[in-house]
Image (cartoon, grey):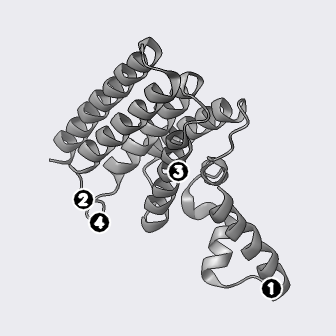
Amino acid sequence: RAESQERGTRGETAALRKRFNDLNAALRDSAESPLDASASFCQEFCQILVEYGGQWKSEEDPLPLLEMYTVAILCFAEATPSLFPECEHVTVVLEKLALTCLDLLLSHSEKVPGALWEDFQSSVKVAHGILGANGNFQLSTLMVLAEESGVWNNATLCSLLSNSMPDAEKGKTHCCVLHLFIYH
């Protein structure tokens, strides 16, 4: 059963990737003004996420949603050269995408399977590079996690949650983490 579910998830992920690629192509070929095309792209992008994400119950099995975020983050980053930077929806969608992915990762206490974690790492690193080339660092927090061999391998995160840091160090770290969550 797990194997057929995995094949089903892989098929869904491939279909999701195709929908995002088609959406990116439509953005590039749009005759709308850059602002309107960007707003339409963001609206359709979010609609696709809602449709896909609605199929899965994160509390039962968050891994299909992590696959969705892995694909979505990279596809959104790949679209950014065609998106109008002054469109407020572009910043909001990317910010919400990063934060909901982070929330999902932090709510999953088990180790993410190797291949999925490697896909996540690769997607975040490539997306961060694409966005960073344009001065956008909204994926910085996810990038910190992607540099680890797993979510719960981040020493600072584990220390914060276990409350095992010296008080002086806690203050500095809490400020850094708070800064990441507020500004990224």
The mark found on residue 57 in the picture is 2
Q: Residues within 10 Å of mark 2 (few under 14, many from 20)?
A: few
Most foreground residue, 26 or 84:
84
Whether the residues at callouts 1 and 3 have beta carbons within 8 Å, the answer is: no
Residues 18 and 43: in front is 43
**Amino acid type assigned to the residue bearing label 1 in the image:** Pro
Q: Are marks 4 and 2 in contact (CB under 8 Å)?
A: yes
Asked whether, in this view, residue 151 is left or right of residue 179, the answer is left
Reading the chain from its start, which is encountered first: label 4 or label 3? 4
Q: Residue at x 75, y 67 (%)?
A: 176
Position of residue 4 measured from the top left corner of the image (x, y, whole percent): 17, 40
Image quarter for residue 167? bottom right
Left/right of residue 5 with respect to residue 134 in the rendered view: left
Instruction: Point out which mark residue 59 bears.
Output: 4
- Residue 119 seen in the current view: yes
Q: Secondary structure at mark 3?
A: helix
Mark 1 or 2: in front is: 2
Q: Report helix, strand or loop for mark 4.
A: loop
Residue 166, numbered circle = 1
- Upstream in sequence: badge 3 or badge 2: 2
Q: In the structure shown, which secondary structural element does the residue marked by tag 2 occupy?
A: loop
Which numbered disc, 1 or 2, marks the residue that appears first in the sequence?
A: 2
Q: Could you tell me if the residues under marks 4 and 1 are in contact, i.e. CB atoms within 8 Å? A: no
Of badges 1 and 3, nearer the viewer stands 3
Work out whether 110 lies above or below 67. Answer: below
